[in-house]
């Protein structure tokens, strides 16, 4: 295999703009994949989608403190810049933006992006200010880079809706791509937080995926009562993972996240569950199959 060249690494907005000036003048389309690093296949699938569609790919790596609540894992969140750069070199990424906290949140920083109803339930209820932090950093990264297209994973379903709302409301000139969740062969959704799980807890965490599959089977079999489906999902979860602490388990409208009571069309099933000391989230869009 030919040696892969490392992406250009910049840490300041000034360096970033200098690097992107000639790219833009050359008429190239620019992709942005915002990440917090500790890259896995889920991130790399976004990078590959970007490489297919755009001429020049920027990945940002920044563990954004403002989206972590008190008592969350900001301090222990893995920081693995060297290995991340190697993985991105393999994918042919042109530029990595890895700013420090001082570059992103200057001492006088005072502006925050508040997203309305779509950010309120589910994650919004359990992680107050989380989406305010996400929306603010994503808007800042979009403003720094000015990409034509930005890529996010469906794994963070509500985050994707929050970002879509923000981009529409604030007329941000970017196209969004929401790419499918990448799973381990046994179904566990890829996440940096999976590394916190002990081997036994890792096994129990398959309960999340299984309960989403169960919901899919029930809906395909014609079950229309959301409450019955949620009860069965909860039972499945607690049977497979007796220590599971459920933050939420929901069937919701895929666009608004309003709760659905009667299944009449597509719904999204979403869940957030603590296994051992790790909080995991997952989701699946469920379609009714048409009965002939
Ligand atoms: O999904 C993530 O990793 C983060 O929330 C994001 C979008 C990079 C913002 O910090």
Image (cartoon, helix red, strand yellow):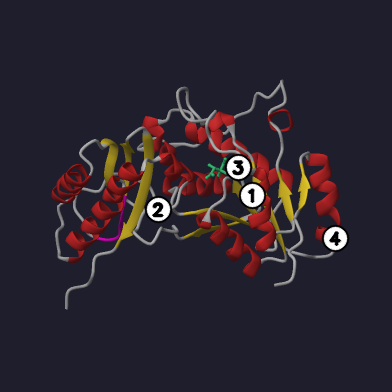
Q: Main secondary structure of the magenta part?
A: strand
Residue 20, horizontal then vertical, whole percent: 81, 53
Cβ of mark 1 under 8 A from ligand 1 = no
Label 3: state its secondary structure: helix
Nearer the observer: mark 1 or 3; the answer is: 1
The residue to which callout 3 is attached is 138
Label 1: state its secondary structure: helix
Residue that appears at 83% across and 51% down: 19
Label 4: state its secondary structure: helix
Which numbered disc, 2 or 1, marks the residue that appears first in the sequence? 1
Q: Is residue 251 above or below residue 94?
A: above
Which numbered disc, 3 or 4, marks the residue that appears first in the sequence? 4
Nearer the observer: mark 3 or 2; the answer is: 2
Specify the segment rendered in magenta: 265-269
Q: CA distance from mark 2 to mark 4?
A: 39 Å
Question: Is 112 within the magenta?
Answer: no
Given the current orientation, which residue lies at the most extreme front position?
199
Check contact, mark 1 vs mark 4: CB within 8 A: no
Q: Quadrant of the C terminus?
A: bottom left
Cβ of mark 3 under 8 A from ligand 1 = yes
Residue that appears at 70% across and 44% down: 143
Q: CA distance from mark 3 to mark 4?
A: 24 Å
Q: Observer-nearest residue: 272 or 3?
A: 3
Which numbered disc, 2 or 4, marks the residue that appears first in the sequence? 4
């Amino acid at each position: 295999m030919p040696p892969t060249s490392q992406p250009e690494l910049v840490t300041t907005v000034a360096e970033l703009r200098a690097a992107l000036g000639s790219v833009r003048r050359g008429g190239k389309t620019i992709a942005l994949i915002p990440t917090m690093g500790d890259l896995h296949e889920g991130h790399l699938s976004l990078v590959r989608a970007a490489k297919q569609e755009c001429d020049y790919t920027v990945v940002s790596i920044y563990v954004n403190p403002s989206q972590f609540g008190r008592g969350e894992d900001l301090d222990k969140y893995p920081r693995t810049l060297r290995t991340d750069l190697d993985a991105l070199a393999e994918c042919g990424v042109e530029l990595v933006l890895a700013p420090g906290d001082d570059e992103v949140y200057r001492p006088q920083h005072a502006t925050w992006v508040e997203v309305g109803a779509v950010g309120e339930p589910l994650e919004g209820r359990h992680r107050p200010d989380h989406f305010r932090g996400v929306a603010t950093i994503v808007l800042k990264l979009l403003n720094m880079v000015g990409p034509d297209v930005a890529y996010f994973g469906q794994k963070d379903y509500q985050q994707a809706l929050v970002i879509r709302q923000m981009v529409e409301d604030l007329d941000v000139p970017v196209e969004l791509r929401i790419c499918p969740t990448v799973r381990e062969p046994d179904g566990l959704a890829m996440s940096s937080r999976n590394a916190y799980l002990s081997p036994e807890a890792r096994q129990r965490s398959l309960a999340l995926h299984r309960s989403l599959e169960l919901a899919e089977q029930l809906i395909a079999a014609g079950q229309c009562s959301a409450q019955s489906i949620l009860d069965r999902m909860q039972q499945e979860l607690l049977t497979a993972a007796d220590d599971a602490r459920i933050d939420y388990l929901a069937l919701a409208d895929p666009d608004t996240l309003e709760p659905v009571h009667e299944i009449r069309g597509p719904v999204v099933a979403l869940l957030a569950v603590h296994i051992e000391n790790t909080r995991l989230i997952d989701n699946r869009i469920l379609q009714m199959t048409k009965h002939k």
